[in-house]
Amino acid sequence: MTAYIIRRLIYAIPILIGVNLITFVLFFVVNAPDDMARMHLGEKRVTEEAIQTWKQEHGYDRPLLYNPDASGLGRFTETIFFEKSIRLFVFDFGSSDNGRDIGYDISQRMWPSLAIAIPVLLVGLAFNISYALFIVFFRATYVDIGSVVLLVAMMSISGLFYIIGGQFLLGKLFHLVPISGYDTGVEAWKFLILPVIVGVIGGIGAGTRWYRTLFLEEISKDYVRTARAKGLSERRVLFRHVLQNALIPILTGVVVVLPLLFMGSLISESFFGIPGLGSYTIDAINSQDFAIVRSMVFLGAVLYIVGLILTDISYTLVDPRVRLQP
Amino acid sequence: MSVMPVVLWTDGLVFLLLALIGAFVLYASRHEHMRAPWRRVVRSRVGVATIVVLGFYVVVGLLDTVHFRLALDRQGDNGAETRYSPEVLSLLDLALSGLRERQEKTYSAPFATHLFVKEAIEQPDGTLLRDYPRLEYGGAHLEDPARQRGFDIAWRAAWGALQGLVIWVVLAAGILWLIARSRGETSAATRAAILAGRTPIPWRTALIMLGIMLVLSAIAGELALKYHILGTDKVGEDVFYQTLKSIRTGLLIGTLTTLVMLPAAVLLGIMAGYFRGWVDDVIQYLYTTLNSIPGVLLIAAAILLLQVYMSNHADDFASLVERADLRLLFLVLILGVTSWTGLCRLLRGEALKLREVDYVQASTALGVGHFTLIGRHILPNVMHIVLITLVLDFSGLVLAEAVLSYINIGVDPTMNSWGNMINSARLELARDPVVWWSLTAAFVFMFALVLAANLFADVVRDAFDPRLKGAR
């Protein structure tokens, strides 16, 4: 097991190098730091001097890959590639274009993101699985057909409308919860309710439909027929046999998104004014802060790869048929 | 009137897509194994109903894709060079020129005759009065709006419905005649069969759906002549016009993204599965790396870079339309980059299976070259996966456009799109009374398109992949 995990971790290294190279090319080669400086300083009439000062302040005044002026190892370390890209590997994100420490910001903003993402995941999972089981229990009746129509309709509504509708109904019409904002500590709960409700409702369509498919696939298998033939009640078949076996794909589907929960949700966080990593990214995109976007790209990639590794491990834990092969 | 045709980048891609679809239809109609699933699609009631709805969207989108510039004056006749208007128009703009040109000052509610905000109006006796001024165009033909408006709207709606019905009857009669001829029956017998729902293709459903759509469009068209049926936005532009223009953007993102990613996904996916070994390793490495970058962030990074490029090279773009079009093209490309990995992985798996199949082994033994083999045996056998992916991805991409435009990394802000409509309208929700019509318009048109696309995708998948039947 340990050997397997180590091997998977070693496989992750070339992928991270690839991601790093892609971000480096995107952010420094396609667009030279000069262009960035010009954009931040405001378009046209920018003196060469101002550009140089801006680059120096933000540490973009080094050569890209090779520094002939330095000596020894410095020829490779005193470059943009080393200072801005390689350091990401040790999670040293440096400072953003407006001078804040990105690593500190991330560690602060992670918690509000998790405070929304985890309840949404758990409540959504519980609701979707129960609803899917309910549909499957009444399969091929009007309950089934009506539910499928409802689910497809819910899938066809843009997530933006769930947020806008939720804010409008609960926040503005009934004055139950604040429309947006955030508070520290226990007081935060009333700001979290609406985003969580909206997040859960927005996920019902696709989620329940997917679980229904899984259950239906499982229910047509031989062991279910055997169980029925033994005289087990439909309820027992569904809850003991079908649910347990269908949990394998459900579990692995959940594990892969677990690490990405840290990243938060871009849209709902910025709509509800929650100071998480999602709104952090959006703000960075809108203020064109390349340093933050670059860090988030790398962080997202790392978390995705961690998710993949966790998925493989969880497969082997819940399904004894899967062997640890490379 | 002389015109100068303009082919934008995305227009060209649309025409390419049409040509490909034409070639595919020709190919499919000659091969029974391709014809059979399509027959299943058009024999399902949901299938034909969604085809009719999607058809209306496609027609509007295509009308909006034929671009040109109108001649400014008629000097061209006497030898001098004709001058063309710098404004790029489409056939849809021309058809809706009334809507496009009838701009109000600012917000007005659907069917309103008065502006949404108070203004100082000068009375005939010289005093100033703060009141809601009459709209310049919306309901301008009414003398006493408070009394006449309800009756006028009802009358026009009824007149529009009648027009729609007449068009429908003519079309239905034509279709009936064609069916009767192909079945070799009398018209009366065919009509009876359709009414009883006994035709293999559910014509009754199709005709009812066609009737509903035609009547609705005719009512909307008739009312739009005199009113802003979906209100006007902040700068007084007709929302109905905006949402019709947004159809092209939505359709384009939904279809072209898959089109641009198709060559890479198909080629690399099949190669990885077919050749295995180091080719497989390299391709797998490539798509795992790309896949591990969160899609939204990659798009954000790419669009940010495009913005930098555009602001530094502002002179390279002849017009706003071209600039917006290039941004749309770029968005389509980058969306393609983030979404090709799924199809690539599917095709790799399928190719891995196919290369072990007897007839492929036989071809290899007979010394058929790799690429002939791929073209002749593997590619046709994975076509259904490509098709299903194309249809399934469509609705997700239409929804993605709205989200991306909301965070300003979608289409150009000057371009009409549902995302931009939502984005500009959501701040107005805080107003009291609420400005709800832009959001509602975007919601209704998007919902109808995505719902139709989702239902259609299900039918297509069931038809092409019968194993999944029932497990929707």
Image (cartoon, rainbow, N blue to C red):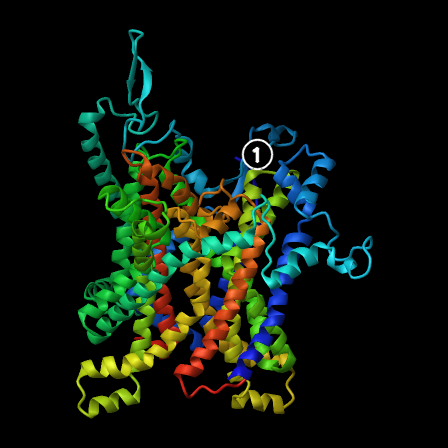
Look at 32% across and 67% down and name the residue there.
A125
Whether residue B233 can be seen here: yes
- Judge from the rendering whether residue A18 lies leftward or rightward of residue B339; answer left or right: right
Look at mark 1 in the image and give the residue it sits on: B86
Task: Identify the amino acid type marked 1.
Answer: Pro
Q: As displayed, is residue A72 above or below residue A243?
A: above
Kindly indicate the quadrant of the structure image that contains residue B218. top left
Which quadrant does the C terminus of chain A fall into? bottom right
For this rendering, which residue is in front, A116 or B132?
A116
For this rendering, which residue is in front, A34 or A156?
A34
- Judge from the rendering whether residue B173 lies leftward or rightward of residue A20; answer left or right: left
Judging from the image, mark 1 belongs to the subunit labelled B
Q: Secondary structure at mark 1?
A: loop
Q: Position of residue A117 (x, y in %)?
A: 38, 59
Q: As displayed, is residue B55 above or below residue B341?
A: above
Look at 65% across and 58% down and name the residue there.
A85
